[in-house]
Amino acid sequence: MPPCTPNLTGSSSPTAIPYGPYTSFPWEPLPEYGGEKSIMFRSDDGKIVAAAARETGTATLTYPCDEFFFVTDGWIKLNVHGGDHFTLTKGEFVYLKKGTTVDFTFGPGFANVAVFMDRERVTLL
């Protein structure tokens, strides 16, 4: 399959539907998480973003928006401040609400696809 085309403007045109393997979209560095990201869709108002990421190492984030992510490869450990500690592996998902603080440990080969949502423009990606 040729490289896929993201929809970065939120176009509702039937010809602007992003589809295909997440690995076939354009990728760019994501240095704050030791990896890279691929934006597949951004709504016209910027309040919804669909993306993929490959991340390494460790990180702590207080969420500035909601995020739903699905692990596509590897594993990730999450330590939710004031909540559960758990590990997700390929095929598992999590929904994290705005304001939640999480410590992450990214396993070898970790990758995910995610949707970020907020009432304001999403600036995390």
Image (cartoon, rainbow, N blue to C red):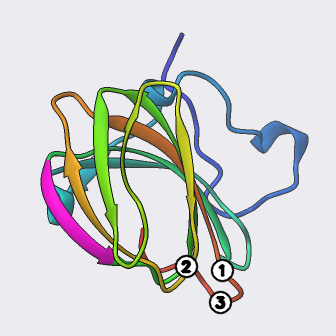
| The quadrant where residue 93 appears | top right
Cβ–Cβ under 8 Å for marks 3 and 2: yes
| Residue 104: image location, x then y, percent | 25, 58
Cβ–Cβ under 8 Å for marks 3 and 1: yes
Q: In this view, does 12 lie to the left or right of 22?
A: right
Above or below for 120 versus 5: below
Cβ–Cβ under 8 Å for marks 1 and 2: yes
Instruction: Give the SS element for disc 2.
Output: loop
Q: Which mark is residue 120?
A: 3
The magenta span reads 57-61
Above or below for 123 versus 94: below
Mark 2, residue position: 65
Please state which of residues 50 and 101 is positioned toward the viewer in this rendering.
Answer: 101
Instruction: Give the SS element for disc 3.
Output: loop
- First of labels 1, 2 by sequence position: 2
Q: In this view, does 15 lie to the left or right of 104?
A: right
Q: Residue 118 carries which label?
A: 1
Above or below for 123 versus 88: below
